[in-house]
Amino acid sequence: MAEFHLEPKPFLGGYHQTFGQTSLSEVTGLAIVSIAIPRGGETELQAAFKSTFGTTIPKPGKYNSSEDGAHRFAGLQIDQIFALFETAEADPANTIAAKLAGTAYTTSQTDNWVALQISGPQAIAALERICPIDLHPTVFSENSVARTVMDHMGTIILRQGPDDFLLLSASSSARSFLHAVETSLRHVT
């Protein structure tokens, strides 16, 4: 019997492009795990977050980091959080489940999302062309997260710094999503 060895490949081949002083890159090696809070289980999960990660459960619309900075937690809605962290593990959901000692439901989302990072002085101008939410720093400040659409594609946007954003969109439309962001960036540079 023939032996096969499968290796994961980035959805966009590890794309990286610079437009003036603004860069657009595919983020690879990022695990995404959905954490759902069981009914009535917020107190237990909050204690597990504090003891394991040294942080609290983020409120919807915000994200925070673990004490060691290895994990980010995005509050997407009441009772749902995304954990984002670098790993090469085949099943990152089991890793998070073990760390939280059964206080939450976890599901791996890694293969469902493509991640792009856009950073630099033209990032906001490019995103404003395709993103309907107000990205002004007084409205969408650092450590903010939102579900939105960009060019008719569902997107999760995290503001990592003044001109630094992480964008998540469905992996099934990765090339179309890249094209939309890249085209918008070309129009402002």
Image (cartoon, rainbow, N blue to C red):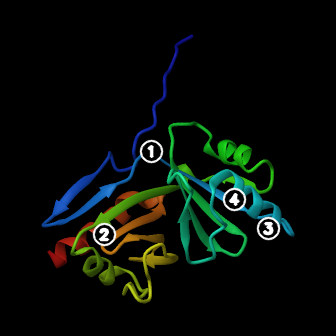
Q: Quadrant of residue 67?
A: bottom right
Q: Amino acid at mark 3?
A: Glu
Residue at the spot of label 4: 50
Q: Earlier in the sequence, mark 4 or mark 1?
A: 1
Residue at the spot of label 3: 42
* Disc 3 to disc 4, C-alpha distance: 12 Å
Q: Earlier in the sequence, mark 3 or mark 4?
A: 3
Label 1's element? loop
Residue at the spot of label 1: 29
Measured from the top left, where is residue 53 in percent x and y? 63, 54
Q: Earlier in the sequence, mark 2 or mark 3?
A: 3
**Mark 2–mark 1 contact, CB under 8 Å?**
no
* Disc 1 to disc 3, C-alpha distance: 29 Å
* Disc 4 to disc 1, C-alpha distance: 25 Å
Residue drawn at the location 32% of the way across and 45% of the way down: 13
Quadrant in the picture for the C terminus:
bottom left
Of circles 2 and 4, which is in front?
4
